[in-house]
Amino acid sequence: MTVVAHGFIARDGTLCLWTETDTGERGSARAHPFAVAPAGADRTATLLLPSTSTGPLPSPQLGLPARRGQPRLRPWQVPAVAVPFVTDDLADEFGARAAPSLSYLAEVCTFAADLVARGRVLPGVLTDGPRPRALWRPVLTGTDAARHADLLRRMPPACRAERARPGDVDGLPAADTLHAALHRLVDGLVRTRLAEAGVDLSGPAWLTALSADPELEDAGQLDAVADALDKWHGEASSGAVVRVCFRLSFLPELEPEEPDATGAPEASGAEDAWLLEFLLQPLDEPSLLVTAADVWRDRSAPLRRWTHHPHERLIAGLGRAARLFEDLDPALRVARPVELVLDTAGAYRFLSHAALLEQAGYGVLLPAWWREPQSLGLALEVRARDEVAPVLRDEAADLRSMVGYNWGLALGGRTLTEDELAELARVKVPLVRLRGRWVYLDAERLRAGLEFLRRGGGTMTAGDALRMIRLLPPEELPLPVTAVDGKGWLADLLAGRLGERLELLDAPAGLVGTLRPYQLRGFSWLAFLDGLGVGACLADDMGLGKTVQLLALLLHRGGGPTLLICPLSVLGNWVREAERFAPGLRVKVLHGADRPDPVHLLDGTDVLLTTYATATRDADALAAVPWDRVVLDEAQHVKNSASGTAKAVRRFDARHRIALTGTPVENRLAELWSILDFLNPGLLGSAHSFRARFAVPIERYADEDAAARLRRATRPFMLRRVKADPSVIDDLPDKRHTRHLCGLTTEQATLYQAVLTEMTGRLTDETEIRRKGIVLSAMTKLKQVCNHPAQLLGDGSPLPGRSGKLERLEEILDAVLADGESVLCFTQFARFGAMLVPHLAARFDVPVRYLYGGTTRRARDQMVAEFQADKRPGIFVLSLKAGGTGLNLTAANHVVHVDRWWNPATETQATDRAFRIGQNRDVQVHTLVCLGTLEERIDRLITDKGVLAERVVGNGEGWLSGLSTDELRDLLALSPEAVVD
């Protein structure tokens, strides 16, 4: 039974959980047919959930078939349990079975806890309820206000799905819901901390109620108190249009003319002076900074648009800032404060308070070296006893090989000398000048590192050395390993240089064909890690020949049987490629309804090919076999570590594991962990530790330090080359892109406008969920209109003369076929592909093949083989999802994208069916775009924004539903130039 965990926020701000199972009874009862009571359920809630006439839509995480019909919000009763707090651990416990609403509640709780920990709270008294009550309230300014706005924007509709009153057709307002939850959490957390610390607030009743029973008597006498506390809270939370800024710099006149050539740390003496400048800055134009000196000289004219009293703004802001950073007091004793001169200790105190000042709404301009600190870590020097070549040819070599090592300390990846370490140990202030620049050293980390160095060096196994640089450092290491140095194969492996420095093996006997230089390096790298028993991820770009590199390894190092798991769409391709490049390998296929027990296929077998679906169904039988090697092709199929497929392949016992993928990360870093943990179980820590230390910092906060550590930790096990790199391959032909702007016929324009009119009419006062469905449905219809009216109408009417895009497609095909060349035509609509095939077959006297999701494996393999072998020009129509990956179609040197998926990565994958190894002609990519329509505007967005567009538009069309009605109208409007009839 699959159980999915959901969360929502009740009207009073209480956090509630409910669970859903895939074994519920379907029906129309008001009780949700899939809801099950969680442990400790204490209430029944009425939630407005997406439903059809047959019942509520099951959550996507359940994997149940989608219901037919237009979804709408309907009320359902679910048993729920109220919880005081939701942690990341709870969301992680459910993994892929945690609904987005549960993870969101964990984010809100983390935010509340962070506010309380930093003291960003103030007391208050509410008098508008049945009885007045005292409470603690969050203070949101600066980055906290931005974080709150981001949470409000990203709130899943399920979090506010509770129905407030009978008859309501929408959930709770998002702003009110988040406000109630955050205030309830902050109040509860502060009271808990006061109780744990044994603090009882005494004094007036309202003050005592902040640590005791919150309810108060006699509202009339509390009005004045409530007003005063509201004013205090308002002043603390107010966002002024102009704010005070601080800029810290080391006084340049005291900088040495030349850095210390020895690199030794320079003692911080009395001559070290730092300048803290005061400035004013408009919030909506941060590039404008006016110094305090200019303010007092009446040179603050640029600020008049925002304030007529800059002097008062400056003094008031500095006064409030002095409560947070007491060193400002001397500056406030002068009539016109301009700046403050600090010694190094004072500069460090300011740097330590910078985050607090920013959270209070002040601007803080700091030196770049503070914003991008050089972290202190351990430096590991390793010395492999064996050179590369002997290990490559010694099949007995493994992670038990002994290596010598020494420890050191590194700052910013550079190992420190003994003199530097000795001087650093004597420094009293954490700010020191090292090698001509200022750096910050955490005294506790430095002490722990120096203490660890006393252990000295020694010997350890290669496996232990690998584990020393894993993502979660072993408990015995006080600091992470940030630098690796040394000689020999192990140092190259740890530093990620092995692919370039390995002594290349000769191509194995039995390999038909010649390996390119980069393929020979990849094969040698695989062979080396195979010999060590270290799992390897070959993540070369699509089309660079991962298949032949793997086949070379299988020929080079045989041993027991290899289990190779791949998608069904490329199963036949693996059989053909093995026959072509490695005919000596004995390959068998485990697939089909009448397949035998896997054990019966192993006799005399080198490679057993199967699909992910079959491997999952036959997991027990396959897990009983002691495989020499397990290989995952298109390994992104196990990106979800909680899926049945991922769990199944982890059970397969093997001496060595390999993953082949062109996209090791598609959406989330957890996908990378899932693949690498399959390869080397436990080497990268648990999923929870990986998420806490890397996924959250990188994905949520763009933490570059965490990203660098992740790259450093994964380098030993991953080899990725891209076609765009000339050092990888310099003889691949060019790929040229042409955008063809197509006009609409009058019929198309009429239908296009009708769809727009219908959509805008239905968007008025709709709920968020309904609105999303309406917008996405309109997107699909508009794209169908741009293709051909008959696709939208579905009436089987003839195609000629009714579509500008079809006319342009025919012109392109005329030219391509006249040159004796072949073409791939991709469409995201399988039904439109089926309409094109008979039309193109009648229009052109060439073979027209069609591959879509319903094509059987046998028919697919036959079509691909015929197309590749056919010397005549031909047309291959493919649905984007079914034919966009895993196929080798180099017989074509033209690719036409008839309609757009609006995901650049997906379209590139499709194009690479032709633009890959084996292609000896230039590839021409044609993109058909309808002029003056949404197609042209979104195409321009993708082209103009480049990488950013990939990140914004990369998930298809879902982002469009978040636009306002006016924004949608502008984006989708039909321009006059669109019609060319």
Image (cartoon, rainbow, N blue to C red):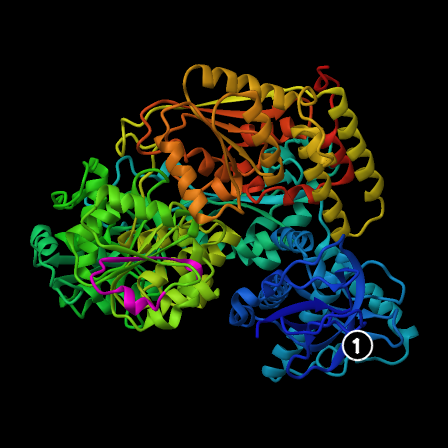
Indicate the quadrant where residue 376 lies: bottom left
Quadrant location, the C terminus:
top right
Q: Position of residue 440 (x, y in %)?
A: 37, 54
- What segment is highlighted magenta in the picture? 596-613
In the figure, 880 relative to 396: above or below?
above
Residue found at x 37% / y 22%: 922
Above or below 387: residue 822 = above
Where in the figure is residue 436, as x and y percent of width and height? 29, 42
Report the number of numbered marks.
1
Q: In the image, is residue 68 above or below residue 855? A: below
Query: Looking at this view, is 769 or 563 the one in front?
Result: 563
Q: Which one is in front, 42 or 392?
A: 392
Q: Please state which of residues 208 and 112 is positioned toward the viewer in this rendering.
A: 112
x, y percentage for residue 335? Answer: 63, 44
On the picture, is 270 further left or further right than 127?
left
Q: Farthest residue in the right direction?
A: 220
Dot 1 corresponds to which residue?
206
Q: Amino acid at mark 1?
A: Trp
